[in-house]
Amino acid sequence: MNKEKAIGIAIDGANFLTRMIKPTGRFVYGYKSQDTLDEISGYNVLRHAGSIWAIMCVDSVAPKKEYREKAKLAIDYMIKEYMVDYRGTSMIVEDGYAKLGGNGLAILSILKWNTKRNKKYDEIILDLARYITQCCMDYNGQFLYHKRNVKYDVDKGFVSEFYPGEAVLALCEISNNTNECFPDELTKIVNYYFNLREAIGTHIRDHWMIQAIESFGMNRWLEYARAIAKEEMKGWPKNKPGPTACRSEALLSYINIEKDESLKKKAKAHLEKMLKFQASMQVREGMHKGGFLWSKTSDVLRNDVAQHNVCSFLRYSQMK
């Protein structure tokens, strides 16, 4: 994969996501095909926030006024429609539930946009972070609340494989970009989930947690990163660019962490195959140029598929 081509793919994808933001700040969740403006039903605030994050990641290397303006619309919409106060903190609530991952991605999206450190948005970021650290985790670093029923203030019992990683990456990025740090919380959380995986004898594909390990320079968890990467390289889907992009995001972080050149080489070989397939699934012309097809058998276009592909191609273009 040529790195110049990769950045072009990422920019086209960011342009597509930017066009999906309505004047209200709400995203089009997706289109029924690449040849129509008919929208698919449903919505998901996690993917709303993740799409903002992807746009602003591209803006950080290829600045565009429209990226920042439309991202602000989407951020303000998210705050107005989904954020509520909770015990001296704030949380993102959708359909009566506060999702741990949704709060993590909300932090990432606002933080990536708020480079000028506007006090209002910084306070929102920290309120959301306090919800994660004070209201969701126990002393050992375990997240007890993945999906909180706000009306009854109880956990739904749903456990996500990816929410902890999204929350950890958010705390890492706050620590890297503001004066607030969460070293004790981060150490406890990552240790807990690494030890949990070791105890049950399996590791999951956690593209968010491995990005967090890379983000905060957590080299002490290299074995954790290796275990995640091993799972990412197992039988990756060759028909859907969304799940494939999540795996390539993980391998990009892993390659930056790994010190063993032979292991790096193996990961890069898998990565190149993944990216080649992902690139083949991008719409190259027409009204939805830059979007990514849902699969080889469906040309539905969804914002989360574009989000993960944009981030993976952007990361590849920056790889040393």
Image (spheres, grey):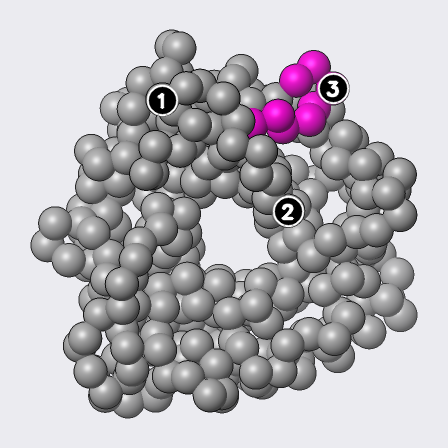
Horizontal side, residue 69 vs residue 318: left or right: left
Horizontal side, residue 225 vs residue 162: left or right: right
Q: What residue type is labelled 3?
A: Asn
Indicate the quadrant containing the N terminus: top left, top right, bottom left or bottom right.
Answer: bottom right
The image quadrant of residue 294 is bottom left
Where is residue 142? Give x, y as percent.
69, 26
Mark 1 falls on what kind of element?
loop
Q: Are marks 3 and 1 in contact (CB under 8 Å)?
A: no
Q: In the depicted view, which residue is nearer to us: 309 or 303? A: 303
Checking the image for residue 161, the label placed there is 2
Q: Which residue is pictured at 72% across the width and 64% down the height?
A: 232
- Give the extent of the magenta segment: 138-145
What distance separates the C-alpha of mark 2 from that of mark 1? 24 Å
Q: Which residue lies furthest to the top in this view?
A: 88
Compared to 1, does 104 lie above or below?
above
Judging by the rendered image, the residue that carries numbered circle 1 is 151
The image quadrant of residue 236 is bottom right
Checking the image for residue 140, the label placed there is 3
Counting residues from the start of the chain, the first of labels 2 and 3 encountered is 3
Nearest-to-viewer mark from 2 and 3: 2
Check if residue 302 falls in the magenta segment.
no
Q: How crowded is mark 1: few (under 14 residues within 10 Å), some or many (20 or more)?
A: few
Q: Which residue is pictured at 70% across the width and 57% down the height?
A: 205
Q: Which amino acid does label 1 sit on?
A: Lys
Q: Is residue 15 visible?
A: no
Horizontal side, residue 258 vs residue 274: left or right: right
Indicate the quadrant containing the C terminus: top left, top right, bottom left or bottom right.
Answer: bottom right
Counting residues from the start of the chain, the first of labels 2 and 1 encountered is 1
